[in-house]
Amino acid sequence: MNANTSRQSPAEREEDSTLLSRTARDLPPGRHQFHKERLMAQIHQEERTTAPAAAPAPARAWWLRLPRPAITLPMTAAVVAASVVAAVLTSGGEAGDPGVADGPVLTTPVGAASTKGVPQLLDRISLAAADASHPEVRPGQFVYVESKTADTYLKTVGDKTTLASHALHSRQVWMSPDGTQGWLIDPAVNDGPEGETLSLPDEQGNTPEAYLNSPSYDYLARLTTDPDALLAKIYKETEGHGNSPDQEAFTTIGDLLGESYPPAELYSALFRTAAKIPGVVVVQDAVDAVGRPGVAVARLDETSGQREEWIFDKKTYRFLGERTVQVEKRTGDEALIKPGTVTYTSAVMERAIVDAVKQTP
């Protein structure tokens, strides 16, 4: 527990609780993730200037998916972050998300996992990545990623909690190589069909620096491509995050595969780096969000009982998408998330370099 939190008086704790519940009511559910992601970027920038060097970094920045909240935050940021997290946990209430309808709960057979052949598969994927066409991003251009995504969540209305899934929907992201200009079109987080700017500075005038969990193309271009050195950097910069260092390292690499554009040498090196993480397995039969079959490189989060899967084409070894599957039974409200529930799924439909924001290939 944060030392400042432990010193709160009962009145202060009651005030914080009131803030959490009020924020959960006031934020439209479709805006929760957007505000949560942008908040984490702001928190990271604050910690870089005020926290000791050994302080752990926060969770993913605002243009990437945020599967987990930060573990340790400064007190002033922690209260605000908790407010947003509380709102996220109550999303899907009576108002519902304005842009994404609920669909059937996402499920899949839990495929068998094996450690056999992991190094060989990742080596083949790495070689395929090295051979693929991978143009550099020039100043003035934008990385464009179009994907299809869906997720499953606990939906609470009144005193009743049920399991629900958002229907599969399109997500389009544009980001400049330096990370200061961008645009997002995603009905799960946008108020209207035109989308919203991701350009910096943000509403508070902050320009967060790129870092490992919210990278720009330029930042990625400066990273080492030596697998041992890269893995050491990942462990160091994500210390204190997630449910274990190994799972957080695996998730960090997975996020770079989904909605960023690592330079060619780094992209190939990421798979050799992943091969060094303990607990990585192969799932021979997996499908992405649009039903494309493939083979998955995966790892089970021992705390949550969820398995994160990166899905690749079995012939070309091209990255197709990712999904998170509940593998183990849970207790309490989380018992509703039974084994075989797909809590998140995505499929990368297009990844390209374009010359203007909102331009498509």
Image: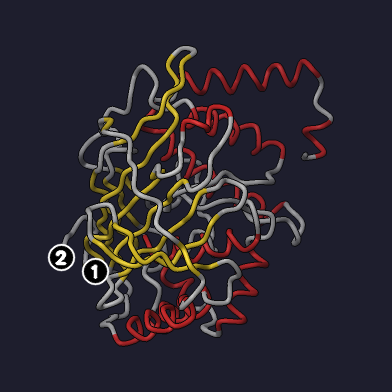
Residue at 27% across, 62% down: 144
Residue at 44% across, 68% down: 282
Instruction: Give me the disc on residue 361.
Output: 2
Q: Assess whether mark 2 and mark 1 are in contact (beta carbons under 8 angstroms).
A: yes
Q: Judge whether residue 45 can be spotted in this image.
A: no
Q: In the rendered image, which residue does mark 1 sit on?
A: 352
Q: Residue 236, image x and y in percent?
A: 67, 67
Q: Secondary structure at mark 1?
A: strand
Residue at 71% across, 16% down: 14
Instruction: State which quarter of the image contains the N terminus.
Output: top right
Q: Judge whether residue 81 can be spotted in this image.
A: yes
Left/right of residue 180 with respect to residue 78 in the rendered view: left
How was the colour assigned to the protein in this rendering? secondary structure
Query: Looking at this rendering, what residue extends furthest in the front direction?
Result: 112
Query: Looking at this rendering, what residue extends furthest in the left direction?
Result: 361
Q: Relative to 82, does residue 158 appear above or below in the rendering?
A: above
Between the residue at mark 1 and the residue at mark 2, the CA separation in whole angstroms equals: 7 Å
Instruction: Give me the disc on residue 203.
Output: none
Q: Secondary structure at mark 2?
A: loop
